[in-house]
Image (cartoon, helix red, strand yellow):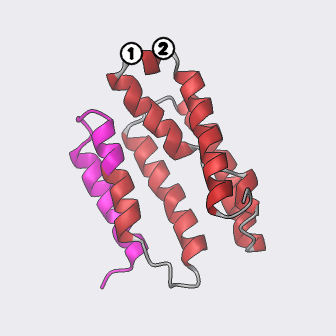
C-alpha cells in the first residue's frame, strides 16, 4: 500500500485540478476530506511531524492552484508563520510549540470560499478571517487540554 502521506498529496493534486473551476467551497471540502480520511494514521509515532509537513505541502499546492481566487497577501504570511512553527515543533517535539504557531490557513481558506458565495462575508472578510483564526486558537487549546 502507498504511504498515506504520499497518497494524500497525490489525491490533493488530482482532485484540486479536477475541481479548480468549481466554486471554491467544493475543492476546499474535498481538500479537507482527503486530509481527514487518507492520512489518519495516528498509531504511527511519527504521525504528528509527518502530518504537519504534509499539511504545509498540501496548502502550498492549494495556494498555487487557486492563486487567482484567494488573497495570497493574507495566506503567505500565515503559511510562513505556520512553517516556522512546524520547524520549531520538529526540532523540539513539543506540541505546545504549535500553540504559538497556530494553523490559521484552513479557516482563512474557508472565509475565501464563503466570500465567493455570500456578499456579507466578502464585505467583512477581515473580520471573518480574524474570527476564524481566533476560533482555531481556542479550539486547539480546548482540544489539547490547555483551557480545561
Image position of 70 with respect to 104: above or below:
above
Observer-nearest residue: 145 or 133? 145
Which mark is drawn over residue 119? 1
Does 41 sit left or right of 102 as displayed? left
Residue at (30% x, 62% y) in the render: 11
Observer-nearest residue: 65 or 125? 125
Tell me where residue 86 appears, x and y as whole percent.
Answer: 66, 61
Q: Quadrant of the C terminus?
A: bottom right
- Extreme-front residue of the structure: 148
Range drawn in magenta? 1-29
State whether residue 18 appears in this view.
Answer: yes
Tell me where residue 81 appears, x and y as whole percent.
Answer: 69, 47
Badge 1: how crowded within 10 Å, few (<14), some, or many (20+)?
few
Q: Secondary structure at mark 2?
A: helix
For the residues labelled 1 and 2, the Cα–Cα distance comes to 6 Å
Tell me where residue 1 appears, x and y as whole percent.
Answer: 30, 85
- Please name the residue that numbered disc 2 is placed on: 123
Observer-nearest residue: 3 or 26? 26
Amino acid at each position: 500500500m502507498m504511504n498515506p502521506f504520499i497518497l494524500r498529496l497525490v489525491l490533493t493534486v488530482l482532485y484540486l485540478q479536477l475541481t479548480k473551476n468549481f466554486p471554491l467551497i467544493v475543492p476546499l471540502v474535498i481538500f479537507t476530506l482527503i486530509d481527514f480520511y487518507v492520512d489518519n494514521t495516528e498509531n504511527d509515532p511519527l504521525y504528528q511531524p509527518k502530518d504537519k509537513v504534509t499539511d504545509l505541502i498540501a496548502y502550498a499546492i492549494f495556494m498555487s492552484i487557486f492563486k487567482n481566487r484567494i488573497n495570497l497577501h493574507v495566506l503567505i504570511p500565515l503559511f510562513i508563520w505556520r512553517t516556522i512553527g512546524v520547524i520549531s515543533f520538529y526540532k523540539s517535539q513539543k506540541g505546545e510549540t504549535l500553540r504559538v504557531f497556530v494553523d490559521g490557513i484552513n479557516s482563512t481558506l474557508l472565509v475565501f470560499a464563503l466570500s465567493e458565495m455570500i456578499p456579507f462575508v466578502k464585505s467583512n472578510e477581515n473580520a471573518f478571517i480574524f474570527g476564524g483564526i481566533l476560533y482555531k486558537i481556542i479550539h486547539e487549546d480546548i482540544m489539547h487540554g490547555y483551557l480545561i
